[in-house]
Image (spheres, helix red, strand yellow):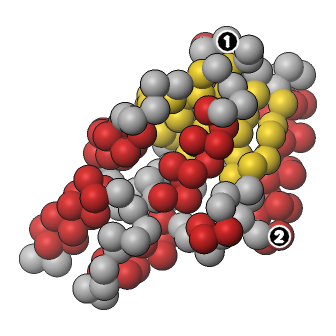
């Protein structure tokens, strides 16, 4: 079976990200969750912290590997001999950007295929920005992230607020 990559900033990884990775692992023999750097984003967590949280959050699934990668996702596909990019679609608003990226990736590497997966309906509204905002305002993020991630987020928020 083909290998798929699931790239994301994962700042931090949420239950929605995990849901998509697990869905993909039922379709592909191996899913590589790629903690990516995006020069257009200013992540709250370092790449190493995001990698550590993603590894811990996804450690229960032997078909999911977590790596860090800087650069074009099509080069990541080549490196890991993968042909499929997994992307989550929460709402119609995600589609236009993802549609453009899928065609751009295919144009740069014609073997690249993008598969869109919808998360469970309970995660359709969830994103990392919302999790960070709830945490900044002192709210409970435990329904939205694994316990290991909630601990890291709250620790970073305490340090950041000093």
Residue positioned 16% across, 78% down in the render: 161
The relative height of residue 90 versus residue 34 in the rendered view (above or below) is: below
Image quadrant assignment for residue 85: top right
Image quadrant assignment for residue 144: bottom left
Q: Secondary structure at mark 2?
A: helix
Q: Position of residue 52 (x, y in %)?
A: 30, 39
Counting labels gives 2
Answer left or right for 131 relative to 26: left
- Counting residues from the N terminus, which is met first, the one under dot 1 or under dot 2? 1
Residue 5 in sight from this viewpoint:
no
The quadrant of the picture occupied by the N terminus is top right
Q: Position of residue 56 (x, y in %)?
A: 32, 40
Tell me the residue that label 2 is attached to. 92
Residue positioned 76% across, 21% down in the render: 83
Q: Residue furthest left?
A: 162
Answer left or right for 6 relative to 147: right
Image quadrant assignment for residue 95: bottom right
Residue positioned 69% across, 52% down in the render: 88
Residue positioned 76% across, 69% down in the render: 91
Answer left or right for 124 relative to 68: right
Q: CA distance from mark 1 to mark 2?
A: 31 Å
Tell me the residue that label 1 is attached to. 81
Give 141 or 44, whichever is nearer the viewer.
Answer: 141
């Amino acid at each position: 079976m083909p290998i798929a990559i699931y790239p994301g900033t994962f700042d931090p990884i949420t239950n929605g990200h995990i849901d998509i990775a697990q869905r993909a692992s039922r379709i592909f023999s191996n899913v590589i969750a790629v903690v990516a750097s995006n020069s257009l984003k200013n992540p709250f967590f370092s790449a190493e912290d995001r990698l550590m949280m993603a590894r811990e959050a996804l450690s229960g699934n032997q078909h999911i590997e977590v790596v860090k990668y800087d650069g074009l996702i099509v080069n990541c596909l080549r490196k890991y001999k993968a042909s499929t990019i997994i992307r989550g679609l929460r709402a119609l608003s995600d589609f236009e950007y993802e549609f453009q990226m899928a065609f751009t990736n295919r144009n740069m590497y014609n073997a690249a295929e993008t598969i869109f997966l919808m998360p469970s309906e309970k995660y359709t509204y969830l994103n990392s920005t919302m999790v960070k905002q709830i945490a900044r305002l002192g709210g409970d993020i435990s329904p939205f992230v694994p316990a290991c991630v909630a601990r890291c987020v709250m620790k970073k928020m305490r340090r950041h607020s000093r």
